[in-house]
Image: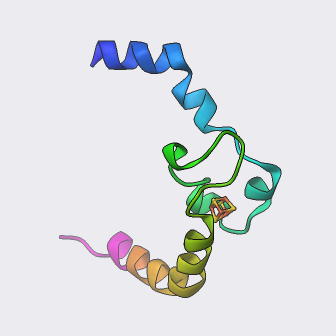
């Protein structure tokens, strides 16, 4: 694990994953999506799956909220 962490630091994985285009940062879904997986982005470009994410969030956000509320209010 130490080696993996060392390598991540060397290549700046975390820092580079925080690079988002202005469009992405202004997107209404950014707080939920955060640009998606860094591996599916090409530099500062939006995620390859951006259009799919937008469709998913538009169509499923209400249900996602419902599930979230259920999980936070239910004790197992
Ligand atoms: S839906 Fe697209 S534009 Fe919006 S935050 Fe996700 S990747 Fe960025």
Extent of the magenta region: 70-76
Give the residue at x 71% y 48%: 45
> Taking 35 as reference, is 44 above or below it?
above
Q: Quadrant of the N terminus?
A: top left
> Taking 38 as reference, is 7 above or below it?
above
Please provide percent x and percent y for residue 33: 57, 60
How is the rendered protein coloured?
rainbow
Q: Nearer the viewer, residue 61 or 36?
A: 36
Tag count in the figure? 0
Give the residue at x 60% y 53%: 34
Give the residue at x 69% y 38%: 19
Give the residue at x 55% y 63%: 49
Q: Nearer the viewer, residue 51 or 16?
A: 51
Q: Quadrant of the C terminus?
A: bottom left
Which residue in the rendered view is the most extreme toward the left?
76
Q: Quadrant of residue 58?
A: bottom right
The answer to whether residue 28 is magenta is no
Please provide percent x and percent y for residue 10: 51, 13
The answer to whether residue 71 is magenta is yes
Q: Nearer the viewer, residue 74 or 31?
A: 31
Task: Please state if 73 lies on the left or on the right of 76 as rendered.
Answer: right
Q: Quadrant of residue 5?
A: top left
Image region (quadrant) for ligand 1: bottom right
> Taking 64 as reference, is 31 above or below it?
above
């Amino acid at each position: 694990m130490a080696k993996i962490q060392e390598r991540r630091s060397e290549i700046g994985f975390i820092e580079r994953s925080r690079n988002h285009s202005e469009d992405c940062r202004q997107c209404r879904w950014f707080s939920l999506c955060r640009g998606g997986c860094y591996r599916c982005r090409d530099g500062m470009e939006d995620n390859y799956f951006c259009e799919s994410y937008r469709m998913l969030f538009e169509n499923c956000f209400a249900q996602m909220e419902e599930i979230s509320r259920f999980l936070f209010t239910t004790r197992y």
